[in-house]
Amino acid sequence: MSMLASSISRFALRSSVRGQSRGITSVSEKVKSVGVIGSGQMGLGIAYVTANVTRLPVVLMDINQAQTDKGMQFFDKLLAKDVSKNKITSEHAKITRELVSTTNSLTQLKDVDFVIEAASENLNIKSAIFKDLDQICKAESILATNTSSISITKIAGVTKRAEQVIGMHFMNPVPVMKLVEIIPGIATSPEVLDTTRQLAAAMGKTTTVVEDIPGFVANRLLMPYINEAFILLESKNASAEDIDTTMKLGTNVPMGPLTLADFIGLDTCLSIMKVLYENTGDSKYRASVLLQKYVDAGWLGKKSGKGVYSY
């Protein structure tokens, strides 16, 4: 493994918990259990923080059993890492692990109070999930989507409970990053917004409330920055290493835009750029040709072993 890959792996395995053995703040009385859909990097991170920090029971759902098994192995690594660093006790870790159950069926989420969907960044996939959740979950359940760019109002529109649908844009890696963007749809009720902010705060997160616009705030700014780095790379005006070093040291950030893109996933970056372009029609959001080529080649970044860099 390269030094770069090793550095990112260590970064991903850090946790936001700092010796806490209880929830950071009280959770709304309306939320006594949480369902998480998707056991990839984002879903797993959300499940981890929910169980480890809020101390709420979590049902982790993924239709792919192999992915679920892989995710829970990573979950156990996170716990072991926190114990080894004296961030949590062995007893705390044991309780956290017992709070998480897994399933391959959405029907097992029928009784949870709050569902956080973290499936692929695709409107059709998310809409299908929410349509099913609307039929399965109890009437008072809140349905949240961890989308980084897709309209909350569009997703809510496939349900009969649009007032109880909301966006929660977690940052990656979830156990480390402190921010959650909260995005109400056009019909989301103030009560659901308040409950969602309380839950995020109980996870130890700082929240911002953002209008339901393409890319929200974080990706409206971040993705064009990453895209411009790919345009520079394609033009051969600077090497990948020099682009990243310039921005890392010049702006005092942990990693440059191309390293960050590899960590996020180049396919995810491309999907977000396409959403921005399709929904605004502004050419400044047109994806780099090189970014599209990398994704077409299967070079998706760290998760595939190759992106801008090799891992």
Image: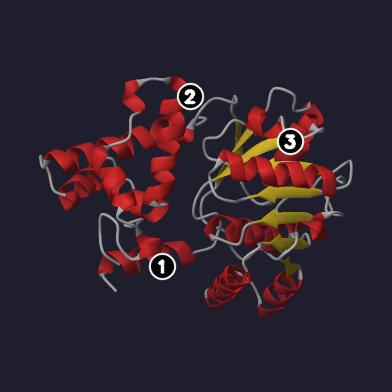
Q: Earlier in the sequence, mark 2 or mark 1?
A: 1
Give x and y (percent) for residue 76: 59, 75
- Give the CA separation, mark 1 to mark 3: 35 Å
Identify the mark at residue 10; answer none if there is no mark: 1
| Residue contact at pointers 2 and 1, CB within 8 angstroms | no
Give x and y (percent) for residue 126: 63, 43
**Tag count:** 3
Give x and y (percent) for residue 58: 75, 61
Residue 289 vertical position relative to residue 258 in the rendered view, above or below: above
Give x and y (percent) for residue 92: 70, 73
Identity of the amino acid at label 2?
Answer: Asn
Q: Quadrant of residue 193?
A: top right
Q: Earlier in the sequence, mark 1 or mark 3?
A: 1
Mark 1 nearby-residue class (10 Å; few <14, some 14–19, many ≥20): few
- Give the CA separation, mark 2 to mark 3: 21 Å
Circle 2: element type: helix
Which residue carries the number 3 mark? 165
Residue at horizontal 47%, vertical 35%?
218
Which residue carries the number 2 mark? 279
